[in-house]
Amino acid sequence: MLKGQTTPRITPNLGEGLNKSGEGAGKKTGDGNVWASGGPHLSYLLKNEEQPFGYACDSLYTVRHILIECPDFQITRRKYFNVTDMYRLFREVHSSRIVGYLKELGNI
C-alpha cells in the first residue's frame, strides 16, 4: 500500500436481500425450493419466533443436525457423504456434494 492510502472500510449490509417483512427476498425456483434465497429457515430469528424442529426426531433444526444427525435425512445424506462429524464433513467431502445434498432436501 502506498503512503497516504487507507484500506477500505468493510461493513455488513444487514438489510440487503430482505423485503419489508424481514424475510429473504430471493426468488423461489419452479419447484418451490427457497434455499437460494436463504429461505424462510432463518426467518424465525427476525420474527422472534421459536427455532424450528423436526417432528419425527423432536430435535431443533441446527446446521449440525441437518448436515450430520437428522435420521429423517439419513437416506438422502448417504447418497452424498458418509461422515459422522462436522470436521470430517468440511475436510473430506467436496463442497459440491454438500450443496447437492442440500438441494435434494429442498425446502425443509
Image (spheres, rainbow, N blue to C red):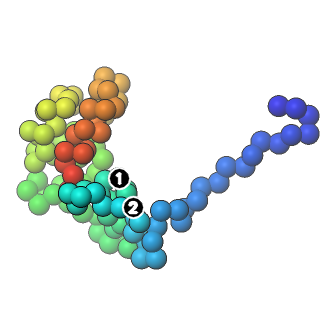
In which quarter of the view is residue 14 placed?
bottom right
Q: Locate the C terminus and report the quarter of the image it occupies.
A: bottom left
Q: Secondary structure at mark 1?
A: helix
Dot 2, crowdedness within 10 Å: few (<14), some or many (≥20)?
Answer: some
| Mark sitting on residue 76 | none
Inspect the image, locate mark 1, and give the three-letter code of the amino acid beneath it.
Answer: Ala
Q: Quadrant of the N terminus?
A: top right
How crowded pointer 1 is (Cα within 10 Å; few <14, some 14-19, many 20+) is rated as: few
Farthest residue, direction bottom: 20
Identify which residue is drawn at 37% across, 56% down.
Answer: 38
Residue of label 1: 36
Query: Could you say which is closer to the camera, residue 12 or residue 26?
Result: 26
Q: Relative to residue 84, is residue 43 drawn left or right?
A: right
The image quadrant of residue 78 is: top left
Residue 70 seen anywhere in this rendered image of the structure = yes
State the image coordinates of residue 100 (x, y, percent, origin top left): 25, 38
Q: Is residue 77 above or below residue 72?
A: above
> Is residue 2 toward the left or the right of residue 56 in the image?
right
Disc 2 secondary structure class: loop
The numbered mark, 2 or 1, whose residue comes first in the sequence reads: 2
Residue for point 34% across, 32% down: 95
Decide: is 10 above or below 28. Answer: above
Amino acid under disc 2? Gly
Please say whether residue 88 is visible from this viewpoint. Answer: no
- Disc 2, disc 1: CB below 8 Å? yes
Question: Residue 103 falls in which quadrant of the image?
Answer: top left
> Which label sits on residue 26?
2
Q: Residue at x 37, y 57 (%)?
A: 37
